[in-house]
Image: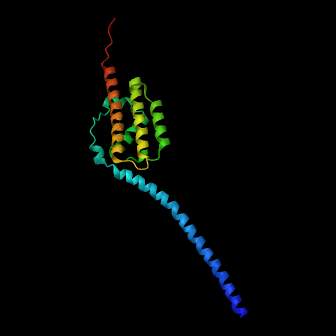
Amino acid sequence: MIAKTHEYNIFVIRFTKFMKNIFLILVLCLLSCQDNDSESSQLTNEKAINELVSKADIDALKYTDFVADAQVEKAVSGWAKYRELSSIILDVKSGNLSFFKSNKEIVATLNNELKSTVPEVVSSPLILARIVAVETKMYKLEGVINLSSPTKESILETVKELLVAYSNLNLQMNKQLERESQRIQKPY
């Protein structure tokens, strides 16, 4: 009888240790799954925004799109940050808004460098004001996209504001270089 109770006690002790190990393994598995879930939800959120607003939606926006003419392109050919901004605007026009998703520092750096590296030939208070307008709209779009649940209408409205601000920057540079080319020196 004592041997059976002793064997039973040993069995219970071993079984208890075994169940503790199984419990620990299950807890570790659940905790590790939780980390992957947050990463996948972030990717899902980014995909949701890109699927929420398509190229067709952005093409349907009504605004006047001014492009930089050949004279402006030549004058700003060395302005790397303007080219980077142009590339971002092309991405936005194609429906790719990933630049603005959780990218606050890069957006701020681009805006600061864009303002500080303006070439002399296009540097004027009017153009600097247009650059500040583009900067404001970029921050606004970045804020709208990073909301927990942005609406399609709010994203499209902010995208339109950014595209209009960029278009106005191009128009202002076109006007300034055109005015400078029309200046005629008066004989004394």
Please tell me which residue is depicted at 45% across the width and 54% down the height of the picture. 42
Quadrant (top left/top right/bottom left/bottom right) for the C terminus:
top left
Total count of labels: 0
Q: In screen coordinates, is 109 left or right of 169? A: right
Which image quarter holds the N terminus? bottom right
Query: Which residue corresponds to the image point at 38% horizontal and 46% vertical from the top-left?
Result: 97
- State the residue at coordinates (32%, 21%): 179
| Visible residue check, residue 85 | yes
In the rendered image, the residue lying farthest to the right is: 2
Q: Residue shown at 30%/44% (left/top)? A: 58
Q: Is residue 15 left or right of residue 148?
A: right
Q: Going by the picture, which residue comes out furthest to the bottom?
A: 1
x then y, percent, for residue 161: 35, 37
Q: In the figure, 141 relative to 178: above or below?
A: below
Color theme of the render: rainbow
Above or below — where is 29 with respect to 15? above
Q: Position of residue 110 (x, y in %)?
A: 46, 38
- Image quadrant of residue 164? top left
Res. 124 visible in picture: no
Q: Position of residue 187 (x, y in %)?
A: 32, 7
Vertical placement of residue 106 versus 20, above or below: above
Task: Pick the residue in front: 146 or 106.
Answer: 146
Q: Residue furthest top?
A: 188
Counting from the top left corner in percent of width and height, residue 84 is at 41, 39
